[in-house]
Image: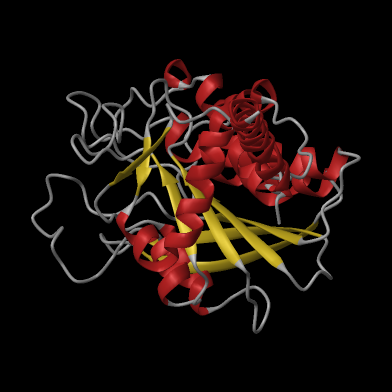
Amino acid sequence: MKNKYWIFSLLFLIVWSCSGDKVNDSLQEPIIRQSTPEFNADSAYVFIQKQVDFGPRVPNSEGHRKTREWLIEKFKSYGLDVKTQDFQARTYDNLTWNLSNIIASYNPSAKKRILLGAHWDTRRMADKDTERINEPIDGANDGGSGVGVLLEIARVITSSEEKLDLGIDFILFDGEDDGEPEFSNTRNSSQIWWCLGSQHWSKNPHQPGYSAYYGILVDLVGAKGARFYREGYSLRYAKNIVNKVWNFASELGYSDFFIPRDAPEIIDDHVFVNRDAKIPMINIVEFSPNYGFGHYHHTHADNMDIIDRRTLKAVGQTVLFTLYQE
């Protein structure tokens, strides 16, 4: 009897232990993710091609003017509230540029707002190239890809049955891609001659007292084989947002694109949004801690041949997913 009782007790403990594991598992709260519509990389690609077809978008040029008109009408066609912030800025070589920040707002009455940014101008020289150095570049990736991603996100959120309760402000900064040539001996001056649009907007927002919960800047987000590391200023000002976005990217299966490794600080539009507008903003940008910018950067190789729909999908779906989790 004692032996039978001991065997019965042992079997009971085993069964209880196994069932206890199941009970504990069942008590774990499931991770609930809000349903997110699909980002269409083909559509984003077409938006990039359209910009390139206008020609280089160098301020004061015909391509710049035509692109501005198209971007405004495209945002309006999605039913967004569109404003422009027109201003003049002086360049490093004492030119006067007529610049225009373009702001398109979704759900403008919502108090909780997210800022999505990119720059829409292109560089007037190919100073990292070995030929045609003084000719402007296509800027398919440097400028075009970020705009293409944001236009597609705007199209998706305004056409989807899955509506967002929060507000989204799309800001396309102008005059980002100027600055002294690589070979200039004045590049170490204290004056920052690029990011002109974000410098202006951050001190003169389109709406008095404007604020946002956080911001995401997308720059150089369409090249083949692109890898996105955790940029230094983003970590300094908005580390929790960086971690959230990179974790979401991993959950979506894009860990080959979003690498959980720190990269150096780079001066891009998000720096001024953080510093002057006091809005925590991160930068999704192709900049390797080992190699810096991609081989195409500020060369004529920055054309449609380097644009990859898989990269556009990884970035666009990750940003879109982030919005819908709010």
Residue drawn 29% across the image and 54% down it: 266
Image x and y of residue 78, in percent: 83, 44
Residue 298 left/right relative to 110: left
Q: Which residue lies furthest to the top in this view?
A: 305
Residue 97 shows in the view: no
Q: Which colour scheme is used?
A: secondary structure
Image x and y of residue 52, in percent: 53, 28
Q: In which quarter of the image is residue 48?
A: top right
Residue 275 left/right relative to 168: left
Image x and y of residue 160, in percent: 86, 38
Is the C terminus in the top left, top right, bottom left or bottom right quadrant? bottom right
Q: Which residue lies furthest to the bottom in this view?
A: 209
Q: Which residue lies furthest to the right in this view?
A: 161
Residue 256 shows in the view: yes
Using the image, determine if residue 193 lies above or below residue 225: below
Residue drawn 13% across the image and 62% down it: 188
Residue drawn 66% across the image and 40% down it: 20
Is 65 in front, or is 192? 192
